[in-house]
Amino acid sequence: MAGGEGPLTSQSSPAAPLFGRSRARFFGSRSHELHAPTTEWGGSGLIVCAETPDRAKVIEAALETAGALFEEAAPATLPALERIHSADYLDYLAHAAQEWLDAGYTLPAASGSYAPRGVPVAPGKSILGRSGYYSFGLGSPVIEGTWEASLGAAGCAIDAANAVLDGADLAYGLCRPPGHHAGRDYGGGYCYINNAALAADLLASRTRSRGGVAIIDLDYHHGNGSQDLFWDRSDVTYVSIHADPDHDYPYFTGRKGERGAGDGEGLTLNYPLPLGSGDDEWVSALEDGLRSIPTPTYIVVSLGLDAEAGDERFQVTRSGFAEAGRRLRDVAPMVVLLEGGYLVSELGRNTTAFLAGEG
């Protein structure tokens, strides 16, 4: 997949043990390279975009060195996406880049207009209004290749979930763009389609138990979109270990008292940690989360790698990622999907450490 050299093989990964698993499969999509914004809007204005194609290329190279054989994922279809996202949001995402250009604006598409609260609102016809309505921040640039790349990332998640349903005990999806900040009708935080939610929803369709699928979100930032999507559902448990939202993005969600509602009450578990938390605090929160949830039939891991020391404001090491992988390895068949992580030099090593449980 790296460097755009030919198609990914359609052959499944070897049946021999890989990363401690009897059957592991790996999925990627070359379309991720089409989403390569150079700038984004930040607190100081237009800044260099941190979410780059190099993230996926480094991880792919490291996993192939460790023995992984990647399969090209099929792009997600609209019916599959509409199980999670609203049709009007998907229509916006598919056409936003061209509408932005047609309106005479400069890419990347972003908007300083936000939908007001407490009154009936509608997206309207203006691309500025629609951009504000369907996003919760300026840090998710939309360019010409964003839609196609998002379909590819979503396809990685769906194919990985199907691989687990077919008997794999580990399936990895190299999802780029990431997804856990995306909700039913909004994107943000580099996320457009919620890949983990697509995988969890598909797996949940094959289970009948309360909390039968668990999303374990290890990204440094709270996955507000994933929490929102499963807030009142009884079939998916959401566990997130992240930076205290009083001090870091996305600021408005992820507090301990957020526990779900209705049929999903008690199936949302948040572990906001103080800035500077390291391996001990991070792994301890994971252990507590696993003790506190129903025994899952399947696990979906939102593997954000930005908890790495030197990336954001945690101090998790490669050993911490390896320990987390060991704790999750034998719980249930597992889908692992890429979320955040911007210290590119460490992404491959940390992903390998997590999947192998060694580092």
Image: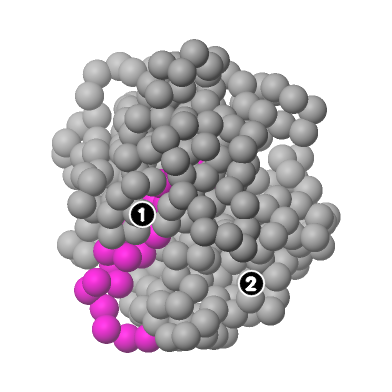
- In the rendered image, which quarter is residue 6 located in? top left
User: Dot 2: within a 10 Å radius of its alpha carbon, few (fewer than 14), some, or many (20 or more) residues?
Assistant: many
Instruction: State the image coordinates of residue 67 (x, y, percent, origin top left).
Output: 36, 40
Q: Nearer the viewer, residue 44 or 5?
A: 44
Residue at position x 42%, y 56% in the image: 184
**Which residue of the protein is positioned furthest toward the front in this rendering?**
119
Q: Which residues are magenta?
A: 188-211
> In the shown orientation, is residue 145 left or right of residue 56?
left
Residue at position x 74%, y 44% in the image: 312
Q: Nearer the viewer, residue 194 or 29?
A: 194
Magenta span includes 209? yes
Magenta span includes 89? no
**Residue 270 numbered mark, or none:** 2
343 up-or-down from 168: above or below: above
Q: Which amino acid does the dot numbered 2 rest on?
A: Asn
Does residue 229 appear in this view?
yes
Instruction: State the image coordinates of residue 250 (x, y, percent, origin top left).
Output: 67, 53
Q: Which amino acid does the dot numbered 1 rest on?
A: His
Indicate which disc, 2 or 1, sits on the residue closer to the N terminus. 1
Q: Secondary structure at mark 2?
A: strand
**Residue 85 numbered mark, or none:** 1
Residue at position x 41%, y 77% in the image: 233
